[in-house]
Amino acid sequence: MGEFPRRPDLEQLRRRAKDLLRAAKRGDADALAKLHAVSDRVILDSAQLAVAREHGFASWPKLKSEIDRRTIFDSTDVTRLRALLVEHPELAVEEMRNWCDHPRGVSPLGYVAMLRYDTSSGVWRDVAGTGAMARALLDAGAPVDGTPTDPETPLMTAASYGDAEVPQVLIDAGADLDATATPTAGGVPGGTALRHAAVFDMTGVVDILLAAGARDLVQSAAAGDITGMLAADTLEADRVAALRIAAAHARLDVIDQLLAAATPVDGLDCDGSTALHEAAYSGQADSVRHLLANGADPIRRDTRFNSTPLGWCRHGRGEAVPGNGHDEVEQLLAPINP
């Protein structure tokens, strides 16, 4: 099945159909086979249908609508988008398929949320008008939280890409702030929209989500208050990530709450390090002392750099401003390292 290029040319596809028709009329066996696979008649409509089928579309008008939709999205022309959705309301919901830069498909809302990243040139840019585009899609029936089979919600996608317009529109439309990505999602598995924004350093979106009342276990652990946020079904990966950031910020009460909730003291975060590694790197002597008292392994090596917490401490000292507690951390760790 043929994929569309990032910047499709409808006229070029029309020429392909005309070339196919001319070849069939000359008796070219391959061209005739392509036309006869979709129709008994050797006419332009049959050639266009054959080209459409090559790209996975049931008809030439369906193919044309898909190209029109992406062209409108890329130009953020909300007037044309609303006109298109009046004529084809299903395009507010139907997944965008067969694009070379989105081979797994993408929802219309998800695509608009990703417009800040130009896939044709691989650069980030500011794009005005995405909020109005998202609002038009919602008005036409696009589900604000996506479908149950989506790995992440449109709000998570917008948070990852740092578009501040789209999240506000989604929040105003009732987007679920507490929804989490699937465990196999490609961005931040199991993470909320707030976690996505924080992981990808999209500060503007973080501020919008916090103002809307979003809470996230890891961010709350950094702030020192996870009251009511631990439940029986809280993922271990989330608890481990929270323990790591609590150690980095010397939130000893939070460390105690997480350990009491059966969080493994030597649990590996997504980068392959433990809370003790992070506490040592950050020069948080109180956290190091607290974790050691709770059984943390001082000679465990991380899986990324194959280094102990003492090694992380020494590396952190070189990157941090003086007086961050690295000397005291070394005094705690050095005697118990081989």
Image: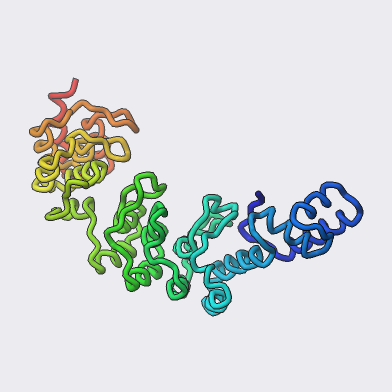
- Where is residue 127 shown, x and y percent of the image? 48, 68
- Where is residue 10 shown, x and y percent of the image? 70, 65
Farthest residue toward the right?
Answer: 26
Nearest the eye: 114 or 183: 183
Instruction: Quadrant for residue 205, please give it.
Output: bottom left
Residue 9 is at least partly visible in this image: yes
> Which quadrant of the rendered structure holds the C terminus?
top left
Q: Is residue 83 left or right of residue 264?
A: right
Q: Is residue 255 left or right of residue 130?
A: left
Instruction: Quadrant for residue 180, please give it.
Output: bottom left
Residue at (64% x, 52% y) in the render? 3
- Where is residue 304 shown, x and y percent of the image? 34, 33
Looking at the image, residue 325 lies above or below residue 74: above
Q: How many marks?
A: 0
Nearest the eye: 46 or 189: 46
The figure's colour scheme reads rainbow
Residue at (78% x, 51% y) in the render? 34
Residue at (38% x, 66% y) in the render? 144
Farthest residue toward the front?
Answer: 40
Residue 328 is at least partly visible in this image: no
Q: Is residue 22 left or right of residue 71?
A: right
- Where is residue 260 shown, x and y percent of the image? 10, 41
Nearest the eye: 85 or 265: 85
Instruction: Quadrant for residue 139, please give it.
Output: bottom left
